[in-house]
Amino acid sequence: QVQLVESGGGLVQAGGSLRLSCAASIRTDRRYTMGWFRQAPGKEREFVAAISWSGGSTYYAESVKGRFTNSRDNAKNTLYLQMNSLKPEDTAVYYCAAGLVVVTTVEARKYSHWGQGTQVTVSS
């Protein structure tokens, strides 16, 4: 069974930074791609970033490319999302997800496991 627990959300001013973490209880014989999604009020859940099992490949939504960095530490079973130059439009609940998918997979329905989410609020 896979369990994902996000942390690190909070309130930050525009231009600031936050680092999200996702602690994963995960089978090591399954090479899960790990992803981040976000959902703002009244909007659909959208893809943010993904990283391959090895950490060697990453993929980002255009809206966050150059500002967000996705990384993972398999020894600690932890996924990270470093978010810099935050904008008010980044405000959302951020979810960690795992799936046996390729790193360019952006459809939320293709990821099989999800965390509970952590709120990120960026004030202007």
Image (cartoon, rainbow, N blue to C red):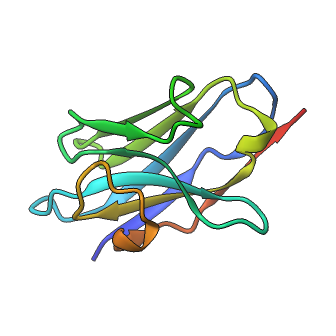
Picture coordinates of residue 24, whole percent (x, y): 35, 58
Q: Give how far across and how far down residue 6 sits, in percent.
A: 53, 55
Split into 4 quadrants, where in the image is the N terminus? bottom left
Q: Nearer the viewer, residue 11 or 84?
A: 84
Q: Which is more toward the observer, 5 or 63?
A: 63
Q: Is residue 58 above or below residue 120?
A: above
Tell which residue pokes out farthest to the front in this image: 62
In the picture as drawn, the residue positioned furthest to the bottom comes out as 1
Vertical side of 16 occupied by 71: above or below: below
Farthest right residue in view: 124
Q: Is residue 28 left or right of residue 41?
A: left
Residue 32 image position (x, y, % from top left)? 23, 58
Query: Horizontal placement of 89 versus 84: left or right?
Result: right
Give the left or right position of residue 94, taking residue 49 as reference. Answer: right
Residue at position x 24%, y 45% in the image: 52
> What residue is shown at x 24% (from left), y 37% (from top)?
55
Of the 4 image quadrants, the one containing the C terminus is top right
